[in-house]
Amino acid sequence: MEKQVIAPRKRKLIHELWLKFVGFVKVFMSNPRAVVGGAIMLFFIFMAVVLTKVLPFDSTPHPELRYLMPTWEHPLGCDAMGRDLFRKLIAGSKSILLISLFTAMLTVALGVTLGLISGLAGGVVDKVIMFIANLFLTVPSFPIMLALAQILTITNEFVFSIILSVWSWAGLARAIRAQIVSLKERDFITICKVMNLSKAHVLFQELLPNIASYIVVNFVLIMRNAITASVGIMILGVAAYDQTNWGVMLSIGQGAIINPKAVMVWLAPVIFITLYQAGAVLLSNGLDQVLNPRLRKL
């Protein structure tokens, strides 16, 4: 009897989730910023997952192709050793995406968790967490990241992400805490308390859904900021050398900027870094409008 009752409930829940998903897709597709930003980010994911296998990078020098300008065979030209710049950028896309994704995941996990604890607990706990967050916000982040990069040996993308995220959570934690403190005073939370609903219900059914859009938007923006920071660290040569990393390519290109024949050596990574950041900004702005009903009406 219980199975017969549960089965219709599951079907109803699945149906409701499907309707919500379809509704989200419709609203998403009606927002030009979200569509363009999503298309750009999908392009980079496609590049990292598919093109790295379809168009592998050949590190063998080809002196006869040195500083070759763009052609059909080499869309972005070749570098100082005659290696294809487009394939070189493709080879570095996987590392770039993993660094940005891991950094966003770690930063959001830390910032949201501490923000929720601070906003819900209040009192001494709130003061301690906010004091630490303010301390982190007071000190410039990039010099600290450089110092951490020198102390810790960057062996993979995850270690790189830890260095980038350890000093990036404070702003998000403060914002989440402010939203939780504001939501706690709303009527629907007061009703939950009167009905003696569990804290888990209040947290997962009432509070988190109201800040979900803010978290998603910040997740995308943190991915964008992570690229900027990682490229800066690679340009300064603090991390381990990787010839396909976009920051390393940009650093090498800066050295060849005075050579007219080498214009694509520095311009190619600039184009890809700019395109990635533009896609992240457009997607975050679009998602903010899609997920926030108040902005959707504007």
Image (tube, grey):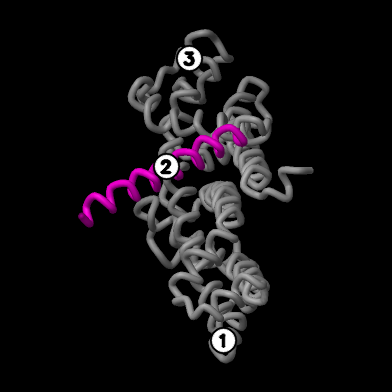
Amino acid carrying mark 1 in the image? Val
Label 1 belongs to which residue?
Answer: 128
Q: Which residues are magenta?
A: 1-28
Rendered view: 205 above or below 47: below
N-term mark: 2 or 3? 3
Amino acid carrying mark 3 in the image? Leu
Q: Identify the disc placed on residue 233.
A: none
Rendered view: 78 above or below 138: above
Label 2 belongs to which residue?
Answer: 95
Name the foreground residue: 31 vs 237.
31
Name the foreground residue: 81 vs 142.
142
Amino acid carrying mark 2 in the image? Ser
Q: Position of residue 34 (x, y in %)?
A: 63, 36
Name the foreground residue: 107 vs 146.
107
Alpha carbon distance from label 3 to label 1: 60 Å
Q: Is residue 19 magenta?
A: yes
Label 3 belongs to which residue?
Answer: 65
* Residue at x 66% of width, y 72% of height: 187
**Mark 1 residue crowding within 10 angstroms, few (<14) / some (14–19) / many (20+):** few
Question: Which residue occupies the extreme bottom position in the image?
Answer: 124
Name the foreground residue: 260 vs 24.
24
Alpha carbon distance from label 2 to label 3: 26 Å
* Residue at x 65% of width, y 26% of height: 259
Q: Is residue 203 magenta?
A: no
Alpha carbon distance from label 2 to label 1: 36 Å
Classify residue 209 by image quadrant: bottom right
Q: Position of residue 112 (x, y in %)?
A: 52, 66
Instruction: Give SS at disc 1.
Output: helix
